[in-house]
Image (spheres, helix red, strand yellow):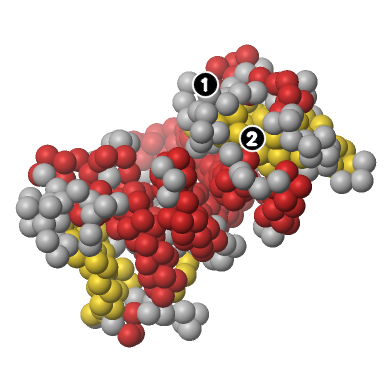
Amino acid sequence: MNHKTKTNPSQNTYKGLFFKNIKWIVLILLGLFLILSVITTFSSNRWIRKEISERQLSLTKATADNLNYRFSRQAIEAVNLMTAIYPYLSGSSISEYEEYAAISKQVNSKDLSPFVPRIFVPDSKVYSSQQDLFFPLSSMKKESGLSDFYGQVGISWIKPHEIRYGLEKKASMIGCLFTMNRMDDYSTIAGSVVLYYPVKSIIDAFGEISQKNEILLVDSYGEVLAGNGSTRLLEANELEMLLSSDSGSKVYSDRVLSFCKLNDIDWYVVIKSYGSVINLGTPFTIIPLLVSVIMFVALIIAVSVAFNIRQMNKALLESMEARYKQKLELSNYQMQALQEQIKPHFLYNSLDIIRWMIADGKKDDAVETITALSKYLRMSISKKSGIVPMSDELELAETYVEIIKKRSSTQFSLVIDVADNTIDCRVPRFILQPILENSLIHGILGCAKPDLELKIRSWIDNERLFIEIEDNGKGIPQDTLSTILKDGNEEPRHGYGLKNTKKRLEVFNGPDTIFEIHSKEHVGTCVSIGIKATHTNEP
């Protein structure tokens, strides 16, 4: 007997529908895959553009910190040179020949490289027409770049202009001008010092930072003062962006532009990158490829997308590595620039007190103060690393207190009680002086207490270096104490130096830095620091 197998009609119907519409199912799946790929591509493109913009802004800020350091040193050297020659220019009792010899000796004894000095003296001086180092004051009115600043007391910055120096050499230079009046007639100029810095040195530095990008030094009118590219004047929309903020970055259709303002000059560092730098992962170059692949097989689409993801991951890893290196460089420049910010603050006050000592006839005190100040400047602007042993900071602190004692009528003593194993500990340069200054201003100076003391203590506990600066003076009122380290407070009377010191310690040591201030009125103030203990003989 033959038996026939019966087939379920509904099963055949489902199979037929499945095989009949399989091409549409595949197209729908591939369409969804295409949409997902396009969304991913657009998202990746925006992320990469943002990453490029942030990376370039970090490079711009690092370059600005580099220039801040160079220009700060240029200003310090100009003020230091004027400090040394000012007694000869302002009412000297020696002959003009001896005066000329003394000033020339002072200039030759200083390491002013790479700067080119010029000294402008009253026309009545017999050596004013020497035309190499010395020039008459009246010639400033005729010289390009200097005429606008004739008679302007203090520091002025001169835009690049060509000057002659040496044996008929010519070069474009940026000048730092420092002018002071006579001590016996404050309405009359005693003289001016100009230190010139070659523009070529700045352009060479730009070239070392980046060969691919255009790096520019620009003034507030958009004029390019120095640069390694062809741009001579910023476009109107670029200048508008510069003037709207101290720093920023923007991606245009053909370029990325980043900028950062310098600290003490109304100039900006601008970096531009063009072309392929910003054309990474453009969606319209990927979509035709995806459509073509869909026309053949889904497997090719998967391989193509996997390859693109792999390339994007590789680019992101390289970008993150480069950004990490730039952050390390930025921390170093920040350390140097923050150290330089404090020096003019103390220097200008000391120059003013020396001027009044001379005016009051206290020439011996003035000479001693100038000697101490010269030692202080030599130690603070030396070309050492930004990290020094604790012994150097203690020597600098003792010199600083010696200067303050000459300036003040308040009697007090300095007590240094430091453990032997802390002498060679590494600390940021110029870390004690701002705290000592704050203790003197807010606690010691003007205090009527007997037996006033300023103490420096240091010890190591659990592999951490602890430093305390304590005084038994007036103490700081609570309302003042609460604002000393408040963000955005820039007034010197509210702890300018302490804010700066805290920032440098955090750059040096990281977020686990201890920086505390304890004070009570009529009792005294204690500033405590805690950082990781590292010694100079450690790698």
Label 1: few (<14), some (14–19) or many (≥20) C-alpha neighbours in 10 Å:
some
Residue shown at 52% from the left, 21% from the top: 243
- Between 21 and 490, the one lying in front of the other is 490
**Up-down: is 461 above or below 338?**
below
Q: Which mark is residue 191?
A: 2
Residue 528 visible in the displayed image: no
**Up-down: is 138 above or below 417?**
above
Marks 2 and 1, how far apart in space?
35 Å
Helix, strand or loop status at disc 1:
helix
Label 2: few (<14), some (14–19) or many (≥20) C-alpha neighbours in 10 Å:
many
Residue shown at 30% from the left, 52% from the top: 408
Name the residue type under label 1: Leu
- Between 523 and 137, the one lying in front of the other is 137
Q: Residue 184: image x %, image y %?
A: 51, 33
Residue shown at 55% from the left, 32% from the top: 181
Of all residues, the one furthest to the top in this rendering is: 236
Is the C-beta separation of discs 2 and 1 under 8 Å? no
Residue 420 visible in the displayed image: yes
**Numbered disc total:** 2
The quadrant of the image that shows the N terminus is: bottom left
**Up-down: is 282 above or below 361?**
above
Name the residue type under label 2: Gly
Q: Which mark is residue 243?
A: 1
Q: Would residue 466 be found to the left or right of residue 258 on screen?
A: left
Q: Residue 56: image x %, image y %?
A: 58, 41
Q: Residue 368: image x %, image y %?
A: 46, 59
Judged by depth in the image, the label closer to the viewer, 2 or 1, is 2
Residue shown at 39% from the left, 57% from the top: 403
- Between 317 and 392, the one lying in front of the other is 392
Q: Would residue 402 be found to the left or right of residue 513 on screen?
A: right
